[in-house]
Image (cartoon, helix red, strand yellow):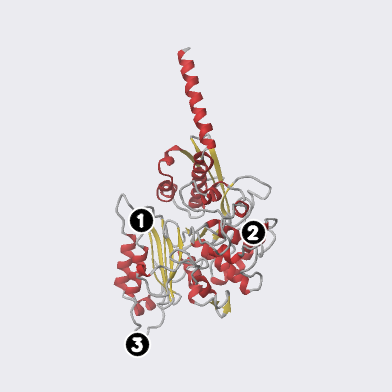
């Protein structure tokens, strides 16, 4: 009898604790976000990036969860290509499904989500050839190799986990290196580098006359106090909505990315705190709303929209590995969820060095690189239209700007040096060394020889 009573007390306390957690921010946002990021990101790392499951959890995911990682039950189904995560195998369950060409999505139900939909990529990855003749004519090769050595140097317990680096000069690949866990075929997560992709897609649609920066997104239909929020405000993150981003699992951005079926609807209906243009604050929800407006111009269905994204932005650049993942409602998560090889990320950056031209064809307006780097009033670092302008304290060449993502995903665009440097990894709570890498690559650049040798190319080893 005593044992039964004690067992009942324990059960009551346990259930009471669960009920309390469900009503608290920890239960409403933090733990569902924890199971959500685990299911979603592990699915993408395993089935999109093709990384080892244990490495993906150890490097990318568990450091974000802290002690909560020990509470999670996680299973990867390689046959069904899906991942499930929960607390103690019982609570705050989340399920992510991989769909070819669409990546991974948290299955939160709803008639708009088709778990069987696939949109395979039409072409295989087209790697850039390593141009050793151009490299040797323009760089100190030993200095480049030393810069790469430094970028990949790691010590325990604080590891920077650099996974991939590629360097373009005048559009030619002059250096690349990968960690043992990756290679040139690995699709790297860009995190917020994806915002630069969304801004570039806006440029494509503006160039083609399909949208303007003063367009008011359809997501605000019926919301009278949102009719003065434009695409420009959303891409610049000064729309004034309550979409705080703290990367702590309890903020609205975490709630949006890892617990919501329709991210655009969630973002559109958040409280309005400021008049548009009045206050700048970094918030991924703004870019999600911008991407929703942009994809609506590409077609009526998700299939048409993804096809339009590929045909109008990626394929003209020779990008054939990019996967931008949608949420369960079909909204492409243009704030955070694009995967591509290092070469293809570098190709996107190169478009800006080429003033928006590809083989003589204008992809984005001639003034788009200037708009992208035009600092938004009140922004940090400062921030432009989906791109960052690093402060002078970083000692990078004048005019450098970046695509920048969480866990130190970076693309450096250096117009005067005609350089693109991309770096990918899983860096948490330690300097990634990325800015030092960019500085050392610049230092390795030298004046070309009087007679530059005939370009010779070879595949990277």
Can the viewer see residue 9? yes
- Could you say where residue 47 lies in the image, as x and y percent from the top left? 51, 51
Q: Splitting the image into 4 quarters, where does residue 367 fall? A: bottom right
Residue name at image x 51 percent, y 75 percent: 370
Q: Which quadrant of the figure contains the C terminus?
A: bottom left
Horizontally, is 429 left or right of 110 in the view?
left
Disc ID at residue 133: none
382 and 177: which is toward the camera: 382
Residue with the mark numbered 1 = 160
Residue name at image x 37 percent, y 76 percent: 135
Horizontally, is 54 left or right of 252 in the view?
left
Can the viewer see residue 321? no
Task: Give whichever of discs 2 and 3 has the lower sequence position.
Answer: 2
Instruction: Provide the secondary structure element on which disc 3 rests.
Output: loop
Residue name at image x 51 percent, y 41 percent: 25
Residue with the mark numbered 3 = 450
Q: How many marks?
A: 3
- Could you say where residue 109 lies in the image, as x and y percent from the top left? 64, 45
Image: 28 above or below 399: above
Task: Give whichever of discs 3 and 1 has the lower sequence position.
Answer: 1
Contact (CB < 8 A) between labels 2 and 3? no
Residue name at image x 46 percent, y 51 percent: 247
- Could you say where residue 384 lies in the image, as x and y percent from the top left? 50, 68
Residue with the mark numbered 2 = 226
Instruction: Provide the secondary structure element on which disc 2 rests.
Output: helix
Q: Residues within 10 Å of mark 2 (few under 14, many from 20)?
A: many
Task: Give whichever of discs 1 and 2 has the lower sequence position.
Answer: 1
Give the Cα distance between marks 1 and 2.
42 Å
């Amino acid at each position: 009898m005593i044992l039964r009573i004690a067992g009942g007390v324990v059960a009551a306390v346990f259930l009471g604790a669960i009920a309390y957690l469900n009503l608290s921010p920890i239960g409403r946002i933090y733990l569902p976000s924890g199971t959500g990021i685990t299911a979603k990101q592990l699915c993408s790392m395993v089935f999109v990036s093709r990384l080892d499951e244990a490495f993906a959890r150890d490097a990318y995911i568990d450091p974000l969860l802290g002690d909560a990682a020990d509470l999670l039950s996680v299973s990867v189904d390689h046959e069904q290509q899906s991942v499930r995560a929960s607390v103690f195998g019982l609570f705050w369950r989340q399920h992510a499904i991989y769909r070819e060409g669409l990546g991974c999505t948290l299955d939160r139900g709803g008639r708009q989500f088709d778990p069987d939909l696939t949109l395979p990529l039409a072409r295989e990855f087209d790697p850039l050839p390593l141009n050793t003749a151009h490299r040797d004519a323009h760089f100190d090769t030993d200095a480049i190799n030393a810069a790469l050595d430094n970028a990949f140097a790691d010590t325990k317990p604080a590891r920077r986990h650099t996974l991939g680096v590629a360097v373009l000069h005048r559009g030619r690949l002059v250096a690349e290196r990968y960690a043992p866990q990756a290679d040139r075929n690995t699709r790297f997560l860009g995190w917020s580098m994806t915002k630069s992709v969304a801004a570039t897609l806006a440029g494509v649609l503006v160039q083609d006359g399909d949208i303007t920066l003063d367009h008011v997104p359809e997501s605000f239909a019926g919301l009278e106090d949102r009719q003065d929020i434009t695409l420009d405000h959303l891409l610049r993150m000064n729309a004034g909505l309550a979409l705080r981003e703290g990367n702590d699992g309890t903020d609205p951005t975490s709630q949006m990315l890892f617990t919501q079926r329709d991210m655009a609807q969630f973002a559109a209906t958040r409280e309005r705190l400021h008049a548009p243009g009045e206050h700048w604050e970094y918030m991924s929800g703004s870019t999600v709303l911008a991407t929703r407006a942009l994809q609506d111009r590409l077609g009526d269905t998700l299939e048409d929209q993804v096809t339009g994204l590929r045909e109008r932005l990626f394929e003209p650049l020779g990008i054939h590995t990019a996967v931008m993942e949608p949420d369960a409602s079909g909204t492409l998560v243009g704030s955070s969820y694009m995967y591509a090889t290092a070469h293809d990320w570098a190709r996107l950056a190169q478009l800006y060095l080429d003033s928006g031209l590809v083989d003589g064809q204008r992809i984005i307006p001639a003034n788009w690189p200037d708009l992208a780097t035009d600092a938004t009033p009140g922004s940090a670092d400062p921030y432009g239209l989906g791109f960052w302008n690093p402060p002078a304290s970083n000692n990078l060449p004048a005019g450098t700007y970046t695509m920048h993502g969480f866990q130190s995903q970076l693309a450096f665009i250096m117009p005067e040096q005609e350089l693109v440097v991309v770096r990918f990894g899983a860096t948490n709570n330690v300097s990634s060394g990325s800015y030092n890498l960019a500085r050392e690559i610049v230092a390795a650049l030298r004046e070309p020889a009087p007679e530059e040798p005939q370009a010779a190319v070879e595949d990277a080893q």
